[in-house]
Amino acid sequence: MTVEDKVKGSLFGLAFGDAYGAPTEFMSIDEIISRWSIYGPLDLEGDPACVTDDTQMAIAVANALISCKANSLTPECLESALRHSFIEWLNSPDNNRAPGMTCLTACEALEVGKQWVEATVKNSKGCGANMRVTPVGLLQVNGSNLADETCAAIAQFQAALTHGHPTALAASNLTAWATKYLLNQSNLNTFSKDLREYAISQRHIYHAQWLGTLWQRPAVESSQQFIARGWDEVLNVLDRLDAALQSPDYDADPCLATGAGWVAEEALVTGLLCFLLYSDRPKKALQRAATTSGDSDSIACLTGAFAGAYLGMSAWSEDWVSRIEYREQLERLAIALTSRS
């Protein structure tokens, strides 16, 4: 299986999960069971199968990365490219999928020309920060993944343009790192341990060249203290993930174990939980992620991105590929993210 196949599998997996979970978002488990079955939706619905702002903004991030890949992955280039992509999304007629207020507010501020550090919603750690970040972990430059430090800085930076809370930065960083990890692994034997070790290693690393003065807040004494707060919250939810995997309950709502996913760190670990419960059954993983009481589309889109990065395009049916919204854009992005030019 090639890296290109896994990158494509992850991009499509994100969109499939998003479309799978969209109908169940804002519904309780009882409501989901009443409308569909005890297992939730049995298949991807619609032709086209429509996605939400999660996929739209992941496409926006991917477009920005590709734009700068051809020139230089610098803070200046990426800030300009992300600003352009986010404003384009803000004004798109397709931006009618109940987007989050943080993204709308920050993008409106970017549109009127505010500096990003002033445009961002500084106390928001909503999952909009990391539902869109997986293309950072998928990006290939000269045939290789981004180095860990560059991947971390870019993952945090793209989050910071809209979500300024340190946990939004840390969760986005770990989401991108997990995606890159799965892209390059053939087994999951040490995945949980490696996630934790990586998180601990990043606890005091503040990417000042990219994040500038974002850390400066009342009662925050240093940039290291600022970012450590975010990583500590991520490490706390990793504890919940480990506990859930030690005694897995395949029938219970995953949100009961790892959180409802409205905030970044919970979206990450609940998406990971659904993927790891069914790491060899990707459709079942998406069904489990969609049959949740929380932010079902964001949980499922991350589940799908992880499954696709690990299993490649063979994880997904041709019927789904033929029906998913934005198919042509996803095909183009998969090629551009992995090209050497």
Image (cartoon, rainbow, N blue to C red):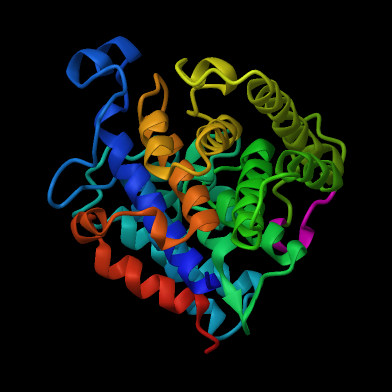
In the picture as drawn, the residue positioned furthest to the left comes out as 47
- Name the residue nearer the viewer: 43 or 266: 43
Residue lying at 64% horizontally and 50% vertically, measured from the top left: 178
The range drawn in magenta is 205-211
How many numbered badges does the structure rendering display? 0
In the picture as drawn, the residue positioned furthest to the bottom comes out as 341
Can you say whether 244 is above or below 178 in the image?
above
In the picture as drawn, the residue positioned furthest to the top comes out as 30
Locate residue 176 relative to residue 330 in the image: left or right. Answer: right
Can you say whether 71 is above or below 300 in the image?
below
Task: Let me know if residue 206 is in the magenta part.
Answer: yes
Q: Is residue 111 visible?
A: no
Residue lying at 50% horizontally and 83% vertically, measured from the top left: 339
Locate residue 92 relative to residue 296 in the image: left or right. Answer: left
Residue 181: x percent and y percent?
A: 66, 56
Residue 104 placement: quadrant: top left
Can you say whether 116 is above or below 99 in the image?
below
Task: Let me know if residue 62 is in the magenta part.
Answer: no
Residue 15: x percent and y percent?
A: 35, 51
Residue lying at 53% horizontally and 42% vertically, measured from the top left: 279
